[in-house]
Image (cartoon, rainbow, N blue to C red):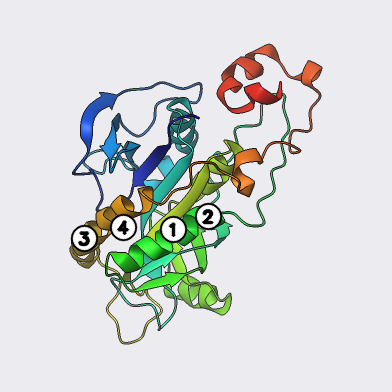
Amino acid sequence: MAEKIVGVIGGSGLYEMEGLEDVQTVSLTTPFGEPSDSFVVGHLEGVKIAFLPRHGRGHRISPSALNFRANIYAMKLLGVQWIIGVSAVGSMKESLHPGDMVIPNQYIDRTIHRQNTFFSDGIVCHISFGDPVCPVLSQILFQAGKEAGATVQKDGTYLCIEGPQFSTRAESRLYRTWGVDIIGMTNLPEAKLAREAEICYSTIAFVTDYDCWHEEAEDVSVGEILRILAQSSKIAKSAIRSAVKHLPEKRECICATALKYALITGKKMVPEKTKKDLEPIIGKYL
Protein backbone atom coordinates (compact mmCIF):
# COMPACT_ATOMS: atom_id res chain seq x y z
CA MET A 1 0.00 0.00 0.00
CA ALA A 2 1.31 3.46 -0.92
CA GLU A 3 2.61 5.69 1.85
CA LYS A 4 0.13 8.28 3.11
CA ILE A 5 1.21 11.74 1.96
CA VAL A 6 -0.54 14.86 3.25
CA GLY A 7 -0.25 18.24 1.61
CA VAL A 8 -0.57 21.33 3.79
CA ILE A 9 -1.22 24.68 2.12
CA GLY A 10 -0.43 27.42 4.59
CA GLY A 11 -2.38 30.63 4.25
CA SER A 12 -1.89 34.04 5.83
CA GLY A 13 -0.05 33.54 9.13
CA LEU A 14 1.10 29.97 8.47
CA TYR A 15 4.31 30.05 6.50
CA GLU A 16 6.15 27.06 7.97
CA MET A 17 5.59 23.79 9.83
CA GLU A 18 7.75 23.18 12.87
CA GLY A 19 8.38 19.66 14.08
CA LEU A 20 8.99 18.06 10.70
CA GLU A 21 11.64 15.35 10.62
CA ASP A 22 13.83 14.24 7.69
CA VAL A 23 13.20 17.60 6.07
CA GLN A 24 14.10 18.36 2.48
CA THR A 25 13.22 21.19 0.11
CA VAL A 26 11.70 20.19 -3.21
CA SER A 27 11.35 22.55 -6.18
CA LEU A 28 8.99 21.50 -8.97
CA THR A 29 7.90 22.75 -12.36
CA THR A 30 4.57 21.93 -13.98
CA PRO A 31 2.93 22.30 -17.41
CA PHE A 32 0.97 25.15 -15.81
CA GLY A 33 3.95 27.11 -14.54
CA GLU A 34 5.66 27.46 -11.19
CA PRO A 35 4.01 26.76 -7.81
CA SER A 36 3.93 29.49 -5.19
CA ASP A 37 7.24 28.33 -3.72
CA SER A 38 9.39 25.30 -3.04
CA PHE A 39 7.82 22.51 -0.98
CA VAL A 40 9.12 21.57 2.44
CA VAL A 41 8.80 17.79 2.67
CA GLY A 42 9.27 15.79 5.85
CA HIS A 43 7.54 13.56 8.38
CA LEU A 44 5.14 14.63 11.13
CA GLU A 45 3.87 12.01 13.59
CA GLY A 46 5.25 9.40 11.18
CA VAL A 47 3.22 10.74 8.25
CA LYS A 48 4.86 12.28 5.18
CA ILE A 49 3.99 15.97 4.82
CA ALA A 50 4.42 18.29 1.83
CA PHE A 51 4.10 21.90 3.01
CA LEU A 52 3.55 24.82 0.64
CA PRO A 53 3.12 28.47 1.69
CA ARG A 54 0.19 29.52 -0.48
CA HIS A 55 1.35 33.11 -0.95
CA GLY A 56 5.05 32.24 -1.09
CA ARG A 57 7.57 32.89 1.65
CA GLY A 58 7.32 36.50 2.69
CA HIS A 59 3.69 36.63 1.47
CA ARG A 60 4.64 37.81 -2.02
CA ILE A 61 1.68 36.62 -4.10
CA SER A 62 -1.78 38.22 -4.12
CA PRO A 63 -4.85 35.91 -4.12
CA SER A 64 -5.71 36.79 -7.72
CA ALA A 65 -2.14 36.08 -8.86
CA LEU A 66 -1.84 32.63 -7.26
CA ASN A 67 -1.06 29.83 -9.69
CA PHE A 68 -3.60 27.41 -8.25
CA ARG A 69 -3.17 24.89 -11.06
CA ALA A 70 0.58 24.66 -10.55
CA ASN A 71 0.16 24.33 -6.78
CA ILE A 72 -2.30 21.43 -6.99
CA TYR A 73 -0.55 19.73 -9.92
CA ALA A 74 2.73 19.81 -7.98
CA MET A 75 0.94 18.22 -5.01
CA LYS A 76 -0.17 15.44 -7.36
CA LEU A 77 3.39 14.97 -8.60
CA LEU A 78 4.49 14.50 -4.99
CA GLY A 79 1.91 11.76 -4.50
CA VAL A 80 -0.28 13.78 -2.14
CA GLN A 81 -3.64 12.13 -1.37
CA TRP A 82 -4.93 14.62 1.23
CA ILE A 83 -4.71 18.42 1.27
CA ILE A 84 -5.32 20.45 4.41
CA GLY A 85 -5.75 24.12 3.55
CA VAL A 86 -5.35 26.83 6.17
CA SER A 87 -7.07 30.16 5.52
CA ALA A 88 -7.87 33.49 7.10
CA VAL A 89 -11.53 34.49 6.71
CA GLY A 90 -14.01 37.13 7.74
CA SER A 91 -17.11 36.26 9.75
CA MET A 92 -20.51 36.93 8.21
CA LYS A 93 -22.46 35.89 11.30
CA GLU A 94 -22.69 37.34 14.78
CA SER A 95 -22.13 33.91 16.29
CA LEU A 96 -18.69 33.49 14.66
CA HIS A 97 -16.10 35.50 16.54
CA PRO A 98 -12.52 36.47 15.68
CA GLY A 99 -10.31 33.56 16.68
CA ASP A 100 -12.97 30.90 16.00
CA MET A 101 -12.27 28.03 13.62
CA VAL A 102 -14.63 26.92 10.85
CA ILE A 103 -14.44 23.74 8.77
CA PRO A 104 -16.51 24.81 5.72
CA ASN A 105 -18.39 22.24 3.69
CA GLN A 106 -19.85 24.49 0.97
CA TYR A 107 -18.59 27.26 -1.30
CA ILE A 108 -19.97 30.13 -3.34
CA ASP A 109 -17.62 31.29 -6.08
CA ARG A 110 -17.40 35.02 -6.78
CA THR A 111 -13.97 34.92 -8.41
CA ILE A 112 -13.68 36.15 -11.99
CA HIS A 113 -10.02 36.11 -13.13
CA ARG A 114 -8.78 32.63 -12.20
CA GLN A 115 -8.01 29.50 -14.19
CA ASN A 116 -10.25 26.96 -12.46
CA THR A 117 -9.74 23.68 -14.34
CA PHE A 118 -6.99 21.41 -15.64
CA PHE A 119 -9.23 20.39 -18.53
CA SER A 120 -9.22 22.93 -21.35
CA ASP A 121 -6.88 21.93 -24.20
CA GLY A 122 -8.85 19.40 -26.21
CA ILE A 123 -10.36 17.52 -23.28
CA VAL A 124 -13.62 18.06 -21.43
CA CYS A 125 -14.31 16.98 -17.86
CA HIS A 126 -17.35 17.61 -15.65
CA ILE A 127 -16.62 16.58 -12.07
CA SER A 128 -19.31 16.33 -9.43
CA PHE A 129 -18.88 19.23 -7.02
CA GLY A 130 -22.12 19.23 -5.08
CA ASP A 131 -20.18 18.27 -1.96
CA PRO A 132 -16.95 20.18 -2.55
CA VAL A 133 -14.85 19.02 0.40
CA CYS A 134 -13.85 15.58 1.59
CA PRO A 135 -16.33 14.48 4.29
CA VAL A 136 -13.78 12.17 5.91
CA LEU A 137 -11.05 14.79 6.15
CA SER A 138 -13.49 17.46 7.32
CA GLN A 139 -14.67 15.32 10.23
CA ILE A 140 -11.07 14.57 11.21
CA LEU A 141 -10.17 18.28 11.13
CA PHE A 142 -13.23 19.14 13.23
CA GLN A 143 -12.20 16.68 15.93
CA ALA A 144 -8.58 17.83 15.71
CA GLY A 145 -9.63 21.44 16.15
CA LYS A 146 -11.52 20.58 19.32
CA GLU A 147 -8.53 18.63 20.62
CA ALA A 148 -6.35 21.68 19.97
CA GLY A 149 -8.63 23.79 22.17
CA ALA A 150 -10.27 25.86 19.44
CA THR A 151 -13.87 26.99 19.29
CA VAL A 152 -14.86 25.11 16.14
CA GLN A 153 -17.89 25.21 13.88
CA LYS A 154 -18.27 22.14 11.68
CA ASP A 155 -19.79 22.93 8.31
CA GLY A 156 -20.63 26.32 6.90
CA THR A 157 -20.58 28.19 3.61
CA TYR A 158 -17.38 29.93 2.49
CA LEU A 159 -17.92 32.79 0.03
CA CYS A 160 -14.80 33.25 -2.09
CA ILE A 161 -14.34 36.74 -3.56
CA GLU A 162 -11.74 37.84 -6.09
CA GLY A 163 -9.93 40.40 -3.96
CA PRO A 164 -7.38 41.60 -3.22
CA GLN A 165 -9.60 44.38 -1.90
CA PHE A 166 -11.95 43.63 0.98
CA SER A 167 -15.72 44.03 0.42
CA THR A 168 -17.64 47.27 0.33
CA ARG A 169 -20.32 47.63 3.01
CA ALA A 170 -23.01 47.16 0.37
CA GLU A 171 -21.41 43.92 -0.83
CA SER A 172 -20.92 42.67 2.71
CA ARG A 173 -24.56 43.30 3.58
CA LEU A 174 -25.69 41.58 0.36
CA TYR A 175 -23.58 38.51 1.10
CA ARG A 176 -25.13 38.32 4.56
CA THR A 177 -28.57 37.91 2.98
CA TRP A 178 -27.25 34.82 1.19
CA GLY A 179 -26.76 33.08 4.50
CA VAL A 180 -23.00 32.56 4.11
CA ASP A 181 -20.89 31.94 7.20
CA ILE A 182 -17.43 33.17 6.22
CA ILE A 183 -15.74 35.14 3.44
CA GLY A 184 -12.26 34.69 1.99
CA MET A 185 -10.16 34.93 -1.18
CA THR A 186 -8.23 31.69 -1.64
CA ASN A 187 -10.19 28.43 -1.34
CA LEU A 188 -11.42 28.61 -4.93
CA PRO A 189 -10.42 27.32 -7.36
CA GLU A 190 -8.13 25.43 -4.98
CA ALA A 191 -10.87 23.04 -3.89
CA LYS A 192 -12.11 22.54 -7.48
CA LEU A 193 -8.66 21.64 -8.76
CA ALA A 194 -8.02 19.28 -5.85
CA ARG A 195 -11.21 17.41 -6.75
CA GLU A 196 -10.17 17.26 -10.42
CA ALA A 197 -6.85 15.80 -9.29
CA GLU A 198 -8.69 13.24 -7.10
CA ILE A 199 -7.07 14.64 -3.95
CA CYS A 200 -9.08 14.87 -0.74
CA TYR A 201 -9.41 18.52 0.33
CA SER A 202 -10.69 20.37 3.37
CA THR A 203 -9.91 23.67 5.05
CA ILE A 204 -9.16 24.98 8.50
CA ALA A 205 -10.53 28.53 8.32
CA PHE A 206 -9.73 31.00 11.09
CA VAL A 207 -11.99 34.00 11.62
CA THR A 208 -9.98 37.20 11.87
CA ASP A 209 -12.67 39.89 11.63
CA TYR A 210 -16.32 40.70 10.95
CA ASP A 211 -15.72 41.91 7.38
CA CYS A 212 -17.33 45.38 7.36
CA TRP A 213 -21.01 44.60 7.91
CA HIS A 214 -20.83 44.73 11.71
CA GLU A 215 -21.95 48.15 12.94
CA GLU A 216 -20.09 47.98 16.24
CA ALA A 217 -16.87 46.22 15.18
CA GLU A 218 -14.08 48.18 13.54
CA ASP A 219 -13.48 47.92 9.79
CA VAL A 220 -11.11 45.23 8.58
CA SER A 221 -7.45 46.11 9.21
CA VAL A 222 -4.41 44.11 8.22
CA GLY A 223 -2.78 44.79 11.60
CA GLU A 224 -5.60 43.23 13.59
CA ILE A 225 -5.81 40.29 11.19
CA LEU A 226 -2.10 39.56 11.65
CA ARG A 227 -2.41 39.74 15.43
CA ILE A 228 -5.19 37.15 15.47
CA LEU A 229 -3.38 34.98 12.94
CA ALA A 230 -0.31 34.83 15.15
CA GLN A 231 -2.50 33.26 17.83
CA SER A 232 -4.38 31.01 15.42
CA SER A 233 -1.30 29.59 13.70
CA LYS A 234 -0.30 27.74 16.86
CA ILE A 235 -3.74 26.13 17.04
CA ALA A 236 -3.61 25.25 13.33
CA LYS A 237 -0.27 23.48 13.71
CA SER A 238 -1.54 21.55 16.73
CA ALA A 239 -4.72 20.54 14.86
CA ILE A 240 -2.72 19.38 11.82
CA ARG A 241 -0.41 17.32 14.01
CA SER A 242 -3.46 15.61 15.52
CA ALA A 243 -5.33 15.20 12.22
CA VAL A 244 -2.59 13.39 10.30
CA LYS A 245 -2.55 10.63 12.89
CA HIS A 246 -6.22 9.82 12.27
CA LEU A 247 -6.30 9.62 8.48
CA PRO A 248 -7.47 6.21 7.25
CA GLU A 249 -5.07 3.87 5.47
CA LYS A 250 -7.41 3.56 2.49
CA ARG A 251 -9.46 6.30 0.87
CA GLU A 252 -13.06 5.29 0.20
CA CYS A 253 -14.51 8.79 -0.18
CA ILE A 254 -15.94 10.48 -3.30
CA CYS A 255 -12.65 12.29 -3.92
CA ALA A 256 -10.55 9.22 -4.71
CA THR A 257 -12.49 8.36 -7.90
CA ALA A 258 -13.84 11.78 -8.88
CA LEU A 259 -12.79 11.40 -12.52
CA LYS A 260 -14.16 7.90 -13.06
CA TYR A 261 -17.27 9.05 -14.93
CA ALA A 262 -16.34 12.72 -15.44
CA LEU A 263 -14.11 12.57 -18.51
CA ILE A 264 -16.29 13.24 -21.55
CA THR A 265 -13.86 13.39 -24.48
CA GLY A 266 -13.11 10.12 -26.24
CA LYS A 267 -9.61 8.78 -25.53
CA LYS A 268 -8.58 8.87 -29.18
CA MET A 269 -9.64 12.51 -29.48
CA VAL A 270 -7.45 13.84 -26.67
CA PRO A 271 -4.37 15.64 -28.09
CA GLU A 272 -1.07 13.92 -27.32
CA LYS A 273 0.36 16.98 -25.59
CA THR A 274 -2.68 17.16 -23.33
CA LYS A 275 -2.33 13.47 -22.51
CA LYS A 276 1.31 14.02 -21.61
CA ASP A 277 0.64 17.16 -19.55
CA LEU A 278 -2.21 15.57 -17.60
CA GLU A 279 -0.73 12.08 -17.27
CA PRO A 280 -0.29 12.34 -13.46
CA ILE A 281 -4.00 13.14 -13.16
CA ILE A 282 -5.71 11.13 -15.92
CA GLY A 283 -3.10 8.50 -16.81
CA LYS A 284 -4.93 5.66 -15.10
CA TYR A 285 -8.05 6.39 -17.15
CA LEU A 286 -6.28 6.52 -20.52
Where is 252 relative to 223, above or below?
A: above
Work out whether mark 3 precedes mark 2 in sequence or the reverse, and give the earlier one. Answer: 2
Sequence-wise, the earlier of marks 4 and 2 is 2
Task: Tell me the SS state at disc 3.
Answer: helix
Residue 201 rendering spot, x and y as whole percentages: 50, 48
Figure check: 112 above or below 227: above
Dot 2 lies on which element?
A: helix
Q: Residues within 10 Å of mark 3 (few under 14, many from 20)?
A: some
101 versus 189 height, above or below: below
The quarter of the image holding the C terminus is top right
Residue closest to the far top: 272
Residue 183's spot in the image, x, y percent?
44, 65
Q: Residues within 10 Å of mark 4 (few under 14, many from 20)?
A: many
Residue at position x 59%, y 54% from top? 132
Q: Which residue is mark 3?
A: 226
Give the alpha-carbon distance from disc 4 to disc 3, as whole Å.
19 Å
- Dividing the picture into quarters, in which one does residue 198 lie? top right
Comparing labels 3 and 2, the label whose residue is closer to the camera = 2
Label 4 residue SS: helix
Q: Quadrant of residue 221?
A: bottom left
- For disc 2, the marked residue is 136
Residue that label 1 marks: 140
Q: Around disc 2, counting alpha carbons within 10 Å, would you say few (fewer than 14), some (14 to 19), or many (20 or more)?
A: some
Q: How many marks?
A: 4
The residue identified by callout 4 is 239
Q: Could you tell me residue 94's position as x and y percent? A: 40, 83
Determine the residue positioned at 24% across, 26% down: 24
Horizontally, is 77 left or right of 253 in the view? left
Q: Secondary structure at mark 1?
A: helix
Say whether disc 4 or disc 3 marks the residue closer to the N-terminus: 3
Q: Confirm or deny contact between disc 1 and disc 3 (CB under 8 A).
A: no
Q: Amino acid at mark 3?
A: Leu
